[in-house]
DNA sequence: ATTATACTTGAAACACTTTTCAAGTGCAAG
DNA sequence: CTTGCACTTGAAAAGTGTTTCAAGTATAAT
């Protein structure tokens, strides 16, 4: 059986590999976790993960940890659910204005979120939603209403059709549904709203346009 | 500008990463090419590839070569299994003779295979097995008998010990177990047969010798 | 013939990584 | 209280891998 620590280490390996394109060394794994002071400790856990079939690895080969893409690790049973929540910074309200909302000084506070909602900790933040432009959109079984918080994965920069994305267009932050025409390549950002005043936004290459992440969850107010 | 040698090296890196889930070391790259006797030579080419923007790499970090897919670094994760079944061309029977069996005109038909058997679609084909030279070998829980089909991953060109490989030696196709002596570097191809007439084949550098893929599955007749 | 380009050679120095092992800690169940 | 489990510690040895450099080769273009 796999333990909570090993699951954390697994997640770190996955996220490290995603970021860099290669696996971490045992030394780096140890460095990343305060409960591991030596590579030998990382070795212990990595060997466990390997024995359980969650990763593959080759002896004496640096950075040879590989992840099986079709194998998901279930979060082990948590004895103390309270300790398993994490703090996520709340940034300025979504449609409030300039792109500078991403600066650190605009952090409004922190939201406490159960870690099981998320795949990874880094790069996720919360935004308070203002307006009704997305009140028909659904993330899981929730809609997005004024005053709710949306969790945004800022590492997700290559949206697929129908993803709800956070974008900044001409210095204005928006939460819209992403739609790209596979033939013309034209990108459209659609409001999923009961309010007809929200028209789709067509992106032209001259617009100052950026996808800042994907909405992965909604936390009702 | 990139040269032909560099393109070859690039392709090797890609195929190695696909097979193993991690990048090769400079030493391994050098070993793989007869025109490179030292890691420093591989270093030279890899640096070129990096300067030209074809790969990314980190200084002093072993096996940190990464390949760009679009603009994102493609992590060499192991691929997962899909859902539906796919068509795989059936080539001429294995020991029927010359290497030209790989030409398209020798496709005998198609075999319908559940994709879950395979890691990837492209580069996989089926071969009908003739003879008893491998009837003791096992792929998963199956042996390889006359009349069976073996699935060959032709992108897998860097076999490990005990892999069952498809090779072409002096224009003759063979399915044998791959064994390389880690000290001498000598390569031996062994028949796993109850029939003692099948002797191991020792590969010398003067032989016209090529690994064409790895047997990844057996489909019983 | 000279120059430039595109490499290869060879060794050594240096850096990074893995592996091992014996001894310990802290916690929870019996 | 004892045992077992799930780890952590600490250091050192044994790999594995990268980088540098100076010198040399081979080919093609000027």
Image (cartoon, coloured by chain):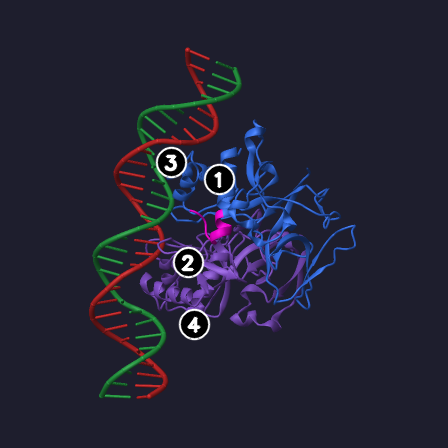
Chain colours: A blue, B purple, C green, D red
Image spot of residue A125 (x, y percent): 57, 44
**Label 1, label 3: how far apart the Cα atoms are:** 14 Å
- Dot 3: element: loop
| B97 shown above or below A62 | below
Would residue B49 appear left or right of B87 to someone viewing this image?
Answer: left
Task: Give SS at disc 2.
Answer: loop
- Measure the alpha-carbon separation of dots 2 and 1: 24 Å
Q: Which quadrant holds the C terminus of chain A?
A: top right
Q: Assess whether residue A20 is covered by the magenta stretch.
A: yes
What whole-number distance in Å separates the C-alpha atoms at marks 3 and 4?
Answer: 44 Å
How many residues crowd around disc 1 within 10 Å: few (fewer than 14), some, or many (20 or more)?
A: many
Chain ID for label 2? Answer: B
Q: Are marks 2 and 4 in contact (CB under 8 Å)?
A: no
The mark found on residue A37 in the picture is 3
Choose between A88 and A64: the one closer to the eye: A88
Callout 2–callout 1 Cβ contact below 8 Å: no
x, y percent for residue B138: 54, 50
Q: Which residue is at a point 52% across and 38% down the rendered structure image? A: A7
Residue for badge 2: B57
Residue visible at 38% across and 53% down? B62
Q: Nearer the viewer, residue B162 or B192?
A: B162
**Mark 4 sits on what residue?**
B2
Looking at the image, residue B38 sits to the left or right of residue B10; the answer is left
Taking the magenta stretch, the answer to whether it contains residue A87 is: no
Upstream in sequence: badge 2 or badge 4: 4
Labels 1 and 3 within one chain: yes
């Amino acid at each position: 059986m796999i333990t909570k620590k090993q699951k954390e280490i697994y997640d770190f390996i996955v996220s490290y590999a995603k970021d860099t394109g290669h696996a971490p060394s045992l030394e780096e794994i140890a460095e990343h976790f305060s409960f591991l002071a030596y590579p030998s400790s990382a070795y212990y856990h990595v060997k466990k993960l390997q024995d359980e079939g969650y990763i593959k690895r080759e002896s004496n080969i640096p950075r040879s940890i590989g992840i099986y893409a079709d194998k998901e690790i279930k979060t082990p049973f948590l004895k103390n659910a309270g300790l398993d929540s994490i703090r996520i910074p709340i940034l300025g309200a979504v449609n409030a204005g300039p792109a500078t909302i991403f600066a650190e000084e605009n952090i409004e506070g922190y939201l406490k979120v159960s870690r099981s909602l998320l795949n990874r900790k880094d790069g996720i933040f919360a935004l308070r939603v203002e307006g009704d432009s997305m009140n028909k959109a659904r993330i899981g079984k929730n809609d997005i209403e004024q005053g709710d918080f949306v969790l945004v994965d800022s590492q997700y920069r290559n949206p697929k059709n129908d993803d709800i994305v956070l974008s900044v267009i001409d210095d204005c932050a928006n939460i819209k549904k992403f739609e790209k025409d596979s033939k013309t390549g034209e990108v459209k950002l659609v409001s999923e709203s009961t309010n007809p005043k929200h028209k789709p936004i067509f992106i032209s290459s001259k617009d100052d346009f950026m996808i800042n992440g994907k909405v992965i969850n909604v936390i009702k107010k």
